[in-house]
Amino acid sequence: MLKLSQLNSGQVFKLVEVPSGLKAELIRLGLCVGDQLQCISKIPFGAVVIQKDLVEIAVGFNYAREILVDVN
Amino acid sequence: MSIKIALVGNPNVGKSVIFNYLTGVYVDVSNYPGTTIEIASAYLKDSNQSIKITDTPGVYGISQNNDEEKATRDYILEADLVINVVSSITLSRDLFLTKQLADLAKPMLVVLNQADEALLRKVAIDTELLAQKLGVNVLQAVATKAVGLDQLKDFILDYQNSFKVGIVSDQIEEYVKPFYDQCLTRMEALMMAESTDSQEAIYLARRKEVDELVKLVVSRAGFSKRVLLGQLLTSPIIGSIVAVLVLYLFLFQFLGVFVAGTVVGFVEDGFFKQYYEPFVVSVVERFSTVKFDNLENLVFNDPLAALGTFLAGDYGVLTLTITYLYGLLVPLVFGFYLGLAILEDSGYLPRLAVLADGILSRLGMNGRAIIPLILGGGCVTMAVVTTRLLTSKKEKLITMALLGLSIPCSAQLGVIQGLLTNIGGIKPWLIWSLSLVFIFGIAGTVLNKLVPGTCGNFISDIPPMRLPNLRNVFTKTYVRSKVFIDEATPAFFIAAASVAGLQITGLLKYVIDFVKPLITNVLLLPAEVSVSFILGMIRRDFGAFGLLSIPMSDAQMITACIVLTLFVPCIATFAVMVKEKNLKVALIIWLASWILAFMFGGLIARVLVYLI
């Protein structure tokens, strides 16, 4: 298991754990625990951009360290 | 009977453009999440029915507790009908709100906007199937080209037949039922259910439905170049290079060289200084005398000359104010907002936020703070108001402080860019901008350590890159410039009048004498610069203008530019800071910028002697 902030751009991953305060916000944007997603960009020591369908979502540095993912 | 309609949708889906078409009222439209702060309401135009439409802030849902969502929720609860605007390219995101609205069981209508962009991205949507599955009418539109909007108007006029209550899922009904007994309406019951522990379950159920619906109605045929371009702009290396290039072109080449140099030179020197001012002076001299470089008391010695000098002297309310307002401020402010509007509407700003998040996180803010920081380059006062968008107290305070300390507003920025370009070469510009970056970084790092609390987290969807709509760009530029100029005009007259007043009473001499030691000993600048600083306290940009006429060495000019940029926020900004925070915070920021500006200025003045 990795932190979202540890991914590289292009990697496909599965969302495993999200801090409880963030869950609802992510579900509304289209991201649920268990979803297969792609990291399309990663700024070193910065934000991560993930994609689902045509929606691109930026997750800031502070959040990205709190989200756990699984890379197959 | 009056009918109330709420226009609801995710950020950046075209609500404001549709609102403008239906009512004829303009609201600030941007390709950035969260730009509609003030809520606009107006009546449907060219209609004999009284139909009131409200443009609500863009939200992803209406249950969470931030100000925008609360406001939107309240407007929906109050409205008779709901028009839900969704983007054709981000259906999986947008339909979440649509389903939530349907669950409220209020008569609604869905506008499937940005149909042209879906086409560009090779996305096809089965509108009929979507309408059938949602149980409401779905209308395709391209709002920016007014396609489908006449039909929307017809639908609104025929609201009894065209607005329908959507299909509510059984699963969600289960969670809502227990609340029926306690509450009056279905809407209140749903809102109650969504504020309890069942929120996550309701959201997951809704999300599942949406994802299945999207699978049914959306089909895609390959990728488009535009998506790839958008993604390149957030990639670390290419993205950073583009960001530096964009800021260089915008700030240095466009605002500094072109607007502050060429355009202002043409308007200010070519017209105002050559024809307008001599004309005013000649008119005033018919009945009085105008004294230049005056430092004595005229009010008692020569009242008529006092009046003439007040009207048309160095700081004359008819000469200096008008020249600066229309010769300098109008082109500069227009130039800044034009550039900003293009950056905004192309969808570039959110990408800048992504790139900046890492750095800003270390300074106690996050990517979102890039909006006020960049808006500060237009008008710091306005930017302080937009710090409301930030979620945590700490972020807000730090952003406000940095705006007050290190961000120049457009007029000041323009004049300073002009002065720096005058000296020649890119070196002065680099020294000035690196100084600001340095102060910004140091102040941010220190504040991050000092201010308690968390810095708030950044999570945002990124709107697609698109070609800005020219009409929209110009309307926005015009409206914003006008607001700025209208706000600045009285302050300019007051500033000029107070300094002209000081001049004709001979008090200016004492003020200069008082500030002089600081200016000459600490900053190694000519004593006349004192006046610029006095002016700068009233309006920052006004202070920078004064520098134009004082002979200085290159090193002195750069020092003066840096100190004036770092120097105190203007009176309007101060007032807004008091309103958004409190008097104590505003005073601390104000005093800190005095100390910081003079300390750093003294340092740089001594370093520059060797550098230049």
Image (cartoon, coloured by chain):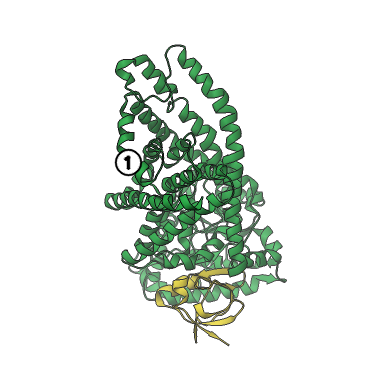
**Of B434 and B149, which appears nearest the observer?**
B434
Exactly how many numbered labels are in the figure?
1
Considering every residue shown, the one lying at the far left of the view is B584
| The hue in which chain B appears in the rendered picture of the protein | green
Q: Residue at x 66, y 70 (%)?
A: B218
Q: Residue B486 vs residue B94: left or right?
A: left
Considering every residue shown, the one lying at the far front of the view is B610
Q: Position of residue B163 (x, y in %)?
A: 55, 56
- Say what secondary structure mark 1 lies in: helix
Q: Position of residue B493 (x, y in %)?
A: 41, 30
Q: Chain of mark 1?
A: B
**Of B307 and B432, which appears nearest the observer?**
B432
Q: Is residue B51 visible to the viewer in this orientation of the structure? A: no
Q: Is residue B319 visible to the viewer in this orientation of the structure? A: yes
**Of B129 and B450, which appears nearest the observer?**
B450
The residue labelled by disc 1 is: B517
Q: Position of residue A34 (x, y in %)?
A: 52, 82
Q: Residue at x 47, y 40 (%)?
A: B484
Q: Residues within 10 Å of mark 1 (few under 14, many from 20)?
A: some
- Amino acid beneath label 1: Pro
Q: Residue B178 vs residue A2: left or right?
A: left
**Of B512 and B568, which appears nearest the observer?**
B512
B170 vs B562: above or below:
below
Q: Position of residue B255 (x, y in %)?
A: 57, 45
| The hue in which chain A appears in the rendered picture of the protein | yellow
Q: Residue at x 33, y 19 (%)?
A: B298
A4 vs B564: above or below:
below
